[in-house]
Image (spheres, grey):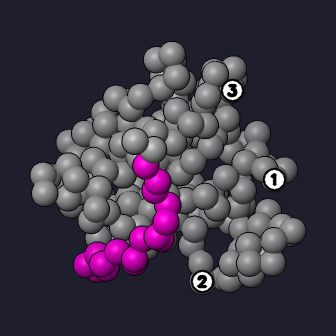
Amino acid sequence: MNETLACIMNRRSTRAFLPEQVKETELQAILQAGLHAPSAHNEQPWHFTVIQDQLLLAELNAGAKEVGKNANDALLRKMCSNEQLHIFYHAPTVIVVSGEEKAIMPKTDCAAAVENMLIAAESLGIGTCWIGLAMLAFQGEKAADYCRQLQIPDGYAPYYAVSLGYKKIAAVSAPPRREDTVNFLR
């Protein structure tokens, strides 16, 4: 199997990180991978906000959990009520991916950028976790404040977040893939 396919097959979500910060050269390589993702009409409608300020991450964690505690979904309420849960898993770096709202397909384009970053990080031995709960912070009453703090440009909305850092534990093997998800018409 070639190196790229091996990275794709071996990548797993990491939820335990070492405290040391990701090397700047590795972080830049990961960001470049995101910037080189495909996008509809080559609009490249993304904006990346790199957060390494642990106090800011703690504030976003609290804000997201506060919104989640009042969600309609029972599992989400339970997760966000867990005082021990840190939605970013204490990662030393988090990248918030925002998209230009007027673009043709900003969420899809930003998702492609995230996937490129996940695979690039794996190729460098850096763990990642795509964090959906982070977006709850941008649905609460402090949403505008968070966007200002993160310097998200006007006309952009935060869609995704990725925690990244050096892995504290070895990756686990992949769970079995669902069957009957591919058909051929030849």
Residue 19 spot, x, y in % from top left: 33, 69
Question: Which residue corresponds to the image point at 52% horizontal and 22% vertical from the top-left?
Answer: 40
* Residue 99 left/right relative to 19: right
Is the residue 136 above or below the residue 30 in the image? below
User: Which range is magenta?
Assistant: 168-184
* Crowding at mark 3 (Cα within 10 Å: few <14, some 14-19, many 20+): some
Q: Was residue 23 drawn as part of the magenta stretch in this picture?
A: no
- From mark 1 to mark 3, how far is it between C-alphas? 19 Å
Q: How many marks?
A: 3
Q: Quadrant for the C terminus, please.
A: top left
Query: Secondary structure beneath disc 1?
Result: loop
- Discs 3, 2 touching: Cβ within 8 Å: no
Residue 185 spot, x, y in % from top left: 45, 44
Does residue 92 show up? no
Q: Which mark is residue 49?
A: none
* Residue 171 left/right relative to 148: left
Q: Was residue 177 drawn as part of the magenta stretch in this picture?
A: yes
Amino acid marked by disc 3: Glu
Question: Which residue corresponds to the image point at 72% horizontal and 48% vertical from the top-left?
Answer: 138
Amino acid marked by disc 2: Gln
- Discs 2, 1 touching: Cβ within 8 Å: no
Q: Which residue is mark 2?
A: 84
Select label 3 or label 2 by which is in front.
Answer: 3
Q: Which residue is mark 1?
A: 140
Is the residue 174 above or below the residue 53 in the image? below
Q: Earlier in the sequence, mark 1 or mark 3?
A: 3
Quarter location, residue 104: top right
Select label 1 or label 3 by which is in front.
Answer: 3
Residue 31 spot, x, y in % from top left: 34, 38
* Residue 61 left/right relative to 15: right
